[in-house]
Image (spheres, rainbow, N blue to C red):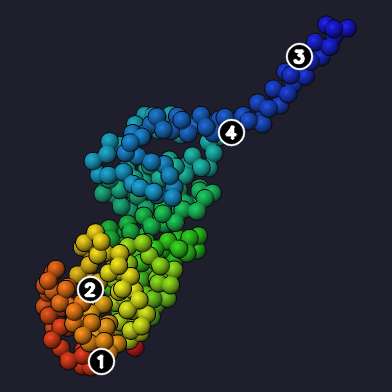
């Protein structure tokens, strides 16, 4: 009787363990796959994060090609691993200056991915804009990426820059502000400076001053290189808002940090004439 009970208990334990292993097997295979993929790359320099927290530097040691070929040959490779392989191939191509090939791999990585990849769309847009010079494609990539992450400030700013400087007709400040969505905020004074410039050109001084003030607030503690430009924009916007003394003070501080002819002109110009000429796209 006792032996029968023990035998039944043993069978039950084995059955439960087998069922558990059956359920966990895909997870185990996926985790082991990630471990194997990690062995193909230099962990300190390369990542396979499709959200693109960081990219390998130009001096990074490329992944082990033989190791990657063996990994690709694994049967039933999940889509997420195919996405990461395409990402690695894209980075290798980018390191070698083969930007068109890099973009193809990045786009395939996006197709295989099942997570939000706005960071990868950022790489696509940057490569198409600054390396391939295909500005319509870069704009399309930026807008596509913003569908999955409307808060991505890099994509918002890239799209705004396309409207301002790279897609004819240029200086489309309204479109730039619309796609940049300054009301969502930014993490860096550089972005606030661009938004402030757009509002200044549109004659929307109150909103522009909010952006310039925020740029100065972020840049001043660390003496960020964007501080002189932020002070210049703040100074012009203050003068255009009727606060002439405060505007002149900001422009003088900008001149003390990085003197330019543009700042000197804004410092000594007639405020009414200056503000009328700067708002050509109202």
Residue 276's label in the rendered image is 1
- Taking the view exactly as shown, the residue that stands out farthest to the right is 1
In three-dimensional space, the C-alpha distance between marks 3 and 1, rounded to whole angstroms, equals 89 Å
| First of labels 1, 2 by sequence position | 2
Residue 65 visible somewhere in the drawing:
no
**What is the x, y in percent for residue 187?**
36, 62
Element at badge 2? helix
Instruction: Identify the residue under disc 2.
Output: 231
Q: Is residue 196 above or below residue 132?
A: below
Look at the numbered discs 1 and 4 and tell me whether their residues touch, using CB distance below 8 Å.
Answer: no
Of the numbered discs 2 and 4, the one sitting upstream in the chain is 4
Q: Residues within 10 Å of mark 3 (few under 14, many from 20)?
A: few
Q: State the separation of the CA atoms marked 2 and 4.
A: 54 Å
Q: Is residue 257 visible?
A: yes
Lower sequence index among marks 3 and 1: 3
In-front residue for pair 80/230: 230
Q: Point out which mark residue 10 bears.
A: 3
Q: Residue at 12% across / 71% down in the picture?
A: 256
User: Residue 15, percent across and down?
Assistant: 74, 21
Q: Which residue is mark 4?
A: 27
Real-space Cα distance between discs 4 and 3? 26 Å
Q: Secondary structure at mark 3?
A: helix
Q: Nearer the viewer, mark 2 or mark 4?
A: 2
The CA distance from mark 1 to mark 4 is 65 Å
Q: Nearer the viewer, mark 4 or mark 3?
A: 3
Nearest-to-viewer mark from 3 and 2 = 2
């Amino acid at each position: 009787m006792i032996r029968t009970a023990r035998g039944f208990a043993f069978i039950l334990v084995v059955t439960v363990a087998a069922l558990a292993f059956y359920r966990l097997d895909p997870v185990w295979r996926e985790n082991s796959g990630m471990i194997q993929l990690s062995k193909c790359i230099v962990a300190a320099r390369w990542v396979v994060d499709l959200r693109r927290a960081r990219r390998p530097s130009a001096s990074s040691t490329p992944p082990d090609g033989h190791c990657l070929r063996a990994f690709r040959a694994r049967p039933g490779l999940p889509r997420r691993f195919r996405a990461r392989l395409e990402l690695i191939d894209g980075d290798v191509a980018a390191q070698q200056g083969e930007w068109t090939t890099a973009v193809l791999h990045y786009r395939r990585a996006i197709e295989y991915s099942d997570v939000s990849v706005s960071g990868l769309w950022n790489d696509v847009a940057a490569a198409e804009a600054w390396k391939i010079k295909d500005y319509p494609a870069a704009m399309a990539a930026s807008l596509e990426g913003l569908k999955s992450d409307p808060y991505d400030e890099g994509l918002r700013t890239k799209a705004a820059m396309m409207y301002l400087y790279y897609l004819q007709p240029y200086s489309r400040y309204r479109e730039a502000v619309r796609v940049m969505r300054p009301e969502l905020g930014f993490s860096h004074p550089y972005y606030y400076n661009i938004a402030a410039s757009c509002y200044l050109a549109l004659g929307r001084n109150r909103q522009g001053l909010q952006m310039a003030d925020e740029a100065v607030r972020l840049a001043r503690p660390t003496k960020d290189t964007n501080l002189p430009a932020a002070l210049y924009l703040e100074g012009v916007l203050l003068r255009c808002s009727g606060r002439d003394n405060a505007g002149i003070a900001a422009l003088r501080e900008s001149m003390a940090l990085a003197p330019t002819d543009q700042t000197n002109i804004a410092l000594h110009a007639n405020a009414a004439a200056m503000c009328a000429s700067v708002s050509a796209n109202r």
